[in-house]
Image (cartoon, coloured by chain):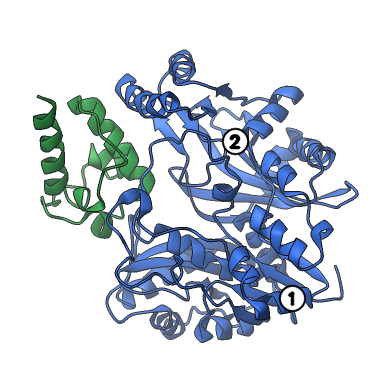
Amino acid sequence: MTSGRTAHWGTFDAERWWRPHDLAVLPAVTMPGGRSAVDAMDELLAGFCRPGDVLVTRHPVADVVRDGLAACGITFEPYAVSPAPGTADRPDPGTADGPALSTADGPPVTVDAMIAADPAARERIAACEEWQPYAVLPDTAALAARLGGPDRLPPVSVVAEVNSKTWSDGLVRKRGLPGAARVVRSAGELEAAVLECGFPAVVKDPYGVSGRGALELTTPGVLAAVRRAVGRQEAKGRRVELLVQPVYPKRCDFSGHLAVAPGGRATVLGVQTMSNRGFRHMGSQPADPGLTAVLMRAGYFDVLAEVADALADAGYWGPAGVDSMLLDDGTLIPVLEINARHSLGLLSLRLDEQAREHGLRCRLRQLDLAVPEGADIGTLCAELRRAGCRYGGGPHPGAAVLAGSTLAAPGGRVHCALFSRPDDADRLERQVLAAVSAAGMRPRGEEHAA
Amino acid sequence: MLADVLQKEGELDDVGPDTDLVEEYGLDSLQTISFLLRIEDTFDVELDYDSLQLSDLRSIRRFAEHVAGLSTAER
């Protein structure tokens, strides 16, 4: 750990910025507000801050969120960048929420580019001894170069390469690990691979992330529809690169987290289990001792060490998360994909370290909420306090709102850290959902709202 | 089909033709695309994802009108 200050900032839809422009895309729709919800997640990086650290975010962190974080010992120096007119963060009047699904939120912009255009933000970051961007994107590298520290981050070409599912699949094949996909490079190959794999199959974009870039192909008709969509792009000269895998009957999803030092030395930080809705991340918490024992017996931690070596050999250093799966029949799929960046699982792990100091554990929970007019994050925090379940530090369990400063009608996203005694996280989660309901809000698409 | 996509088998009896699927049922981007692909399969239509408007997908009535329009255009 460094004794100096660290600057934190980040663009959460990192894969979008690594993806080559000439690749064909899977059929997709962008729902209204989807990107703004992801953009606002950068305040989650507060969870990585030590006292005195600088956190630069796209939007101001709401006072009620900062106060809540301070109560549980998370303090930092906040700074919100000044958006440039005409960007997605400051839309020109009349252009917000355009109707077309593919361009609903206007042109995207990284927070790194916004920082580069904001002298005060640059000054704050340059004054810090350490830099911890969420991910190293082309704009991050440009910012680092502008601040006089291009070598303080791994090369962006390496980062982009090792984050590709094609790269991690190559590693799986080279090591002879179970769960290798088939990489296809044309619409015809896609069809053949899925027919060979059988239904249902999953097709993945090499730069897809949770909730985007992966489709389950359930029938020949669905395959035909996807083949048509990919084939149309291929005919226009787009390059096809997709991965095809069976849909595995799984017992649980989990992720192993690593820190790879510049010299190549790696540390295994821990394992988090993930709760997903479809392909979408909904939360994470520490792996229970039973799962950890199974993973040790299966050699999972040896595989993590091999992944770390491969990342270092490729020229990467920094945090990495390895998404993995345990199947119903006990088979371990140790490497589904590698996220060579910060991640929600790593954040959850960091918060769990703090919780353990007080005999608690941490579950990170994402809530997509329908919000009535006039309600905001303050409304929710007030209800959590009224219900006696807002975390205030120490050994008393409770929930801390980590992100959600921009929450407003008709809806938005909130992340909570649930600090509870071991085995009591479900009860605390029910209390939080009751507070959500008392605030007049409703989790979208969830069956168990209190 | 929608119930299957939303993983709410047997729970969608009260969905009206104008119910907002995004606000009321939390239909997300992945579920939407899964629903659209199954529509293409079941009704033998081809959707143009580039030209689909959000307003075409907000309710069953609007989407049915959109699909009916496609079918007419193809004849």
Q: Name the residue nearer the viewer: A373 or A153.
A: A153
Image quarter where the C terminus of chain A lies is bottom left
Amino acid at dot 1: Arg
Q: Secondary structure at mark 1?
A: loop
**Which label sits in the foreground, 2 or 1?**
1
Picture quadrant where residue A387 is located: bottom left
Residue A252 position within the rendered picture, expressed as x and y whole percent measured from the top left: 55, 41
Chain coloured green in this rendering: B
Residue ID for mark 2: A326
Residue ID for mark 1: A50
Chain coloured blue in this rendering: A
Amino acid at dot 2: Leu
How many neighbours does mark 1 have within 10 angstroms: few (below 14), some (14-19), or many (20 or more)? some
Residue B30 position within the rendered picture, expressed as x and y whole percent measured from the top left: 38, 44
Q: How many marks?
A: 2
Can residue A271 be seen at all in this image of the molecule? Answer: yes
How many neighbours does mark 2 have within 10 angstroms: few (below 14), some (14-19), or many (20 or more)? many
As measured in the structure, the alpha-carbon distance from the residue carrying label 2 to the one carrying label 1 is: 34 Å
Image quarter where the N terminus of chain A lies is bottom right
Q: Name the residue nearer the viewer: A379 or A358.
A: A379
| Picture layout, residue A399 above or below residue A104 | below
| Picture layout, residue A171 above or below residue A144 | above
Q: Name the residue nearer the viewer: A119 or B70.
A: A119
Residue A20 position within the rendered picture, expressed as x and y whole percent measured from the top left: 58, 40
Residue A361 position within the rendered picture, expressed as x and y whole percent measured from the top left: 64, 65
